[in-house]
Amino acid sequence: MTLRRGNHAEEADPEGLPRSRGIATRLILLATAGSTNSELAERLRREPAVAWPEFAVLATLNQTAGRGRLGREWKAPPGTMLAVSVVLRPARHLTVVTSRTLGWLPLLAGVAMTEALRSLDVRATLKWPNDVMIGGKKVCGVLCEYDGQQENVVVGAGVNLYFGSDDLPDDRATSLALEGVTASPDDVLCSFLTSLRARYREFMAASGDSRASGLAQRLEEMCESVGQEVRVELPGAATIEGRAVRIDGEGRIVVVEDAMEHHVAAGDIIHLRQTGST
Ligand code: BT5
């Protein structure tokens, strides 16, 4: 995709990503952004909510200060990665937004991205909680953030499109190009938004119930972590090693170590018995 300056000063290309524009309620494609999540959060603070309806999207192919979970960096050379942030407002659909419902949203986003890539013939799977993987390597990471009132949820996703093998941020990363997939940014974003909208609509219609909405079953089908021997690195220094047996009702992964069940809400999973452990 060629990036050119249009009438809209800040937009890389006001007509770019045309199919995605048909699905987003608003789409701003920036020539560059520090972090699309931070940039969108800032605009949500500054501008009225009507300017950013649900499924409004901020995107760039040149994110210079991408953020991962737990303060980590999300890196990509200019023009190689689609960074996208989407506004959701669950409080508009539910009488009460519980932490359980909020906890499922990052998982929902990971499911939506996995489905999106599968619809483009990519053999994508999920590593709990929401890393999208191809052949044991990470092609997409998800970061969901909430404002203080939990009114706005920003769903961020970074998809590695065009990395060459010399550009990889670490040896457990891959890109669509490296996997021989030629999908355009518009193909990826359009498929992601389509799946995100469908899964979110079902989840809201089921009052945030992951099983009644079918979300939990989709996650179980896609999640390669369940059934594996894993090491869980918990925030801080603690680790758990054992078999991941299921995902519980709160979206936590259940790991059995020495016959004891641990319900893990946050942490990094390393698959131990898989070629090129992930
Ligand atoms: C994530 O964090 O996987 C969440 C990444 C979310 C990025 C999107 S882009 C749009 C939006 N705006 C933002 O600022 N962020 C979101 P985590 O699970 O903590 O993984 C971070 C780790 O992945 C790093 O410590 C590296 O080891 C590795 N990593 C960094 N860049 C990567 C990349 N492009 N591809 C694969 N792995 C990467």
Image: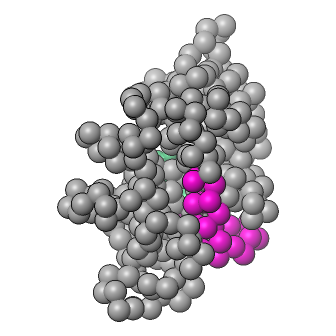
Quarter occupied by the C terminus: top right
Quarter occupied by the N terminus: bottom right
The answer to whether residue 182 is left or right of residue 162 is right
- x, y percent for residue 244: 67, 24
Residue, x 50% and y 66% (percent of image)? 24
The answer to whether residue 144 is left or right of residue 104 is left
- x, y percent for residue 184: 64, 76
Which residue of the protein is positioned furthest toward the left in this rendering? 46
Which residue of the protein is positioned furthest toward the top in this rendering? 259
Q: Mark yes or no: residue 234 visible.
A: no
Q: 129 or 169: which is nearer to us?
A: 129
Placement of 58 over or under 237, stated as above or below: below
Residue, x 43% and y 35% (percent of image)? 94
- x, y percent for residue 113: 62, 54
Placement of 170 over or under 9, stated as above or below: above
Q: Is residue 190 magenta?
A: yes
